[in-house]
Amino acid sequence: MQNRRTFINRLAGVAGLASFSPFIYEAQGRDLLKRLQLANARSIIDVVKDEDFWMAIRQAYTISPVIINLNNGGVCPQPKVVQDAVEHYNRLSNEGPSHFMWRILDAGREPLRYKLADFGGCATEEVAIVRNTTEALANVIFGLRLKAGDEVIITKQDYPNMINAWKQRAHREGIVLKWLNFDFPIEDEEAIVREFEKAMTPNTKLVHITHMINWNGQLLPAKKIAKVAHKNGAEVLVDGAHSFAHIDYKISDLDCDYFGSSLHKWMCAPFGSGLLYVRKDKIKNLYPLNAANEPESEDIRKFENLGTRSFAIEQAIGTAIDFHQMIGNERKQQRLYYLKQYWTEKVLKMPGVTIGTPKSSAFSGAIALLQVNGKSPLEVSEFLFSKYKIHTVAIDWENIKGVRVTPNVYTTLKELDKLVAAVEDCATSLESNARKQ
């Protein structure tokens, strides 16, 4: 069992956060450290259902008392220690920007690269630090050496920014986009893999896989799809925006050639932080999005040629990783799935209410899509917020319609009970109006 000092050091991070973050010395911080220590001696499922433990986690966040935020699928808030780290590095940068940014903090990218690689289960020389998933994947989409007639397999349920990037390459260079259109939810891995495999031809050069569909939380069997793609001579690009630090896996587990994710989602890192993974033997032939001195270099750093950036945001990523690992990958995933199951099982008992997300933990995590028959997603989302101040997001995209509800580790069961009551009120109001008509 790790002692209290070990936990403080992990929260402090490599730059000595303990010296400028008061949270870990406050009552809430001390309580959190104590509970984290005790949790290591308990079963995961016991901790997952311990509301006192998760209330201590909640105290590490600066959660609004005015609204219930159930749109963590968009972007996740940062715990206090991460916010403190950003403020510290920002103040340091402003003491002498060119000195502290370029001569001090810039050197901090290498320890951070090591930490990200260790977390992702890949080599240090395969990880670049970028600003979000869009930037990470754009490096791959626009950097691949494709020509007219080359085929890329994508789905209509992929993220719009990536779809548009591929459309632009197709428009400018004549590459061929092979579209798949799924009717999710699906809890059959082989059925999903077969659809990808059927689209493959000798001209298929790349398969684009969204690991977790952002619209409804459907998890795809990325590794199995990658295996089939490689067997057919195609490379694999994985969009891990919603699965990374949400589902317990390593990038290396996916057997992909390229991977990108936003760290400001489930890692709860500073807004505008992300990572790009490129398999070592693929780096040389991938052109960087922003021109580098040696575009055919085998150095992963060529993808970081951004010019001036926020070193405060970048350096605080390390603190977010520490905080995430204190909770624990498996413990976090199981808690998030538990929260999803808690409220969805209750609302499914209501007439006219369905969930457009897989039930199984093999195909889902925290994200779930609420559907109320007879009401549009926007009507339901606005009802939840206007009457109950529950913040969600309406989804209407390619066979997926509903209200995306996404709790996080700081979400309490009481808040989800309020959501359940609000959904019942919404469904009842609809039924009552129908009878009057």
Image (tube, grey):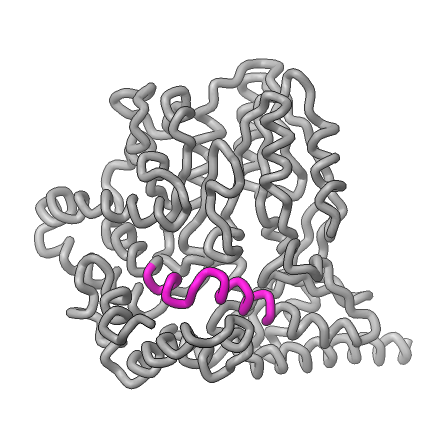
Q: Residue, x 53% and y 34% (percent of image)?
A: 237
Q: Nearer the viewer, residue 382 or 241?
A: 241
Is 233 rendered above or below residue 369? above
Is 188 rendered above or below residue 193? below
**Residue 44 in the image, given as x and y percentages of width and height:** 51, 71
**Residue 97 in the image, given as x and y percentages of width and height:** 12, 49
The residue segment tinted magenta is 322-339
Q: Quadrant of residue 198?
A: top right
Q: Residue, x 44% and y 25% (percent of image)?
A: 143
**Residue 261 in the image, given as x and y percentages of width and height:** 45, 46
Looking at the figure, which quarter contains the N terminus? Answer: bottom left
Q: Nearer the viewer, residue 64 or 185?
A: 185
Is 355 rendered above or below residue 118? below
- Looking at the image, how many numbered discs can be counted on the residues? 0
Give the main secondary structure, helix, strand or loop, of the magenta stretch.
helix
Q: Residue, x 29% and y 33% (percent of image)?
A: 301
